């Protein structure tokens, strides 16, 4: 859930009021400490928008003002993770075709 916290923090920074970078870190830690099941339970109760971090936990309520939509952000993060997991893994090792990579030896 830490990635959700970072994404929420980035959105908070882009709001009219913005925030300091340390608050983004606080959001990442607060969401990172929260199990996904707890977050989904909050969404089920209609608590979808970030109010603030309170006692180290994200405080969510219904849509008000320009509060960031955490449920929407959660879905965006899930979509990015799913898309990346479908990509083939990058090749490991030294790429071929670089100068000095063909048949040279230090011996």
Image (cartoon, rainbow, N blue to C red):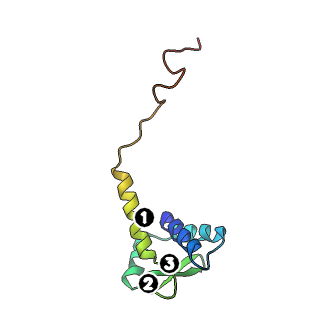
- Observer able to see residue 38: no
Q: Quadrant of residue 53?
A: bottom right
* Residue occupying image coordinates x 45% and y 26%: 96
Image position, residue 43 (x, y; %): 39, 80
Tag shown at residue 77: 1
Secondary structure beneath disc 3?
A: loop
Per the model, the C-alpha gap separating discs 3 and 1 is 14 Å
Image position, residue 29 (x, y; %): 57, 67
Per the model, the C-alpha gap separating discs 2 and 3 is 11 Å
Residue that label 2 marks: 47
- Observer able to see residue 50: yes
Which residue reaches farthest left? 86
- The crowd level at tag 1 (other Cα within 10 Å; few <14, some 14-19, many 20+) is some
* Residue occupying image coordinates x 51% and y 87%: 65
Left or right for 86, reference 29 = left
Tag shown at residue 100: none
* Residue occupying image coordinates x 65% and y 67%: 21
Image position, residue 92 (x, y; %): 44, 35
Which tag is nearer the camera, tag 2 or tag 3?
Answer: 3
Q: Nearer the viewer, residue 1 or 83?
A: 83
Q: Is residue 82 above or below residue 76?
A: above
Of pointers 2 and 1, the one earlier in the residue sequence: 2
- The crowd level at tag 2 (other Cα within 10 Å; few <14, some 14-19, many 20+) is many
Which residue reaches farthest top? 107
Per the model, the C-alpha gap separating discs 2 and 1 is 18 Å
Residue that label 3 marks: 68
Which tag is nearer the camera, tag 2 or tag 1?
Answer: 1
Q: Nearer the viewer, residue 16 or 85?
A: 16
Secondary structure beneath disc 2?
A: loop
């Amino acid at each position: 859930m830490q990635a959700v916290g970072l994404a929420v923090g980035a959105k908070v920074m882009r709001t009219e009021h913005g925030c300091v970078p340390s608050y983004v870190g606080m959001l990442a830690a607060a969401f990172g400490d929260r199990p996904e099941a707890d977050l989904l339970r909050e969404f089920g109760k209609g608590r979808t928008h970030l109010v603030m971090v309170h006692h180290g936990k994200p405080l969510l309520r219904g849509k008000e003002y320009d509060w960031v939509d955490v449920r929407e952000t959660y879905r965006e993060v899930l979509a990015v993770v799913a898309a990346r997991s479908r990509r083939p893994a990058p090749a490991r090792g030294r790429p071929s075709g670089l100068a000095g990579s063909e048949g040279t030896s230090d011996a």
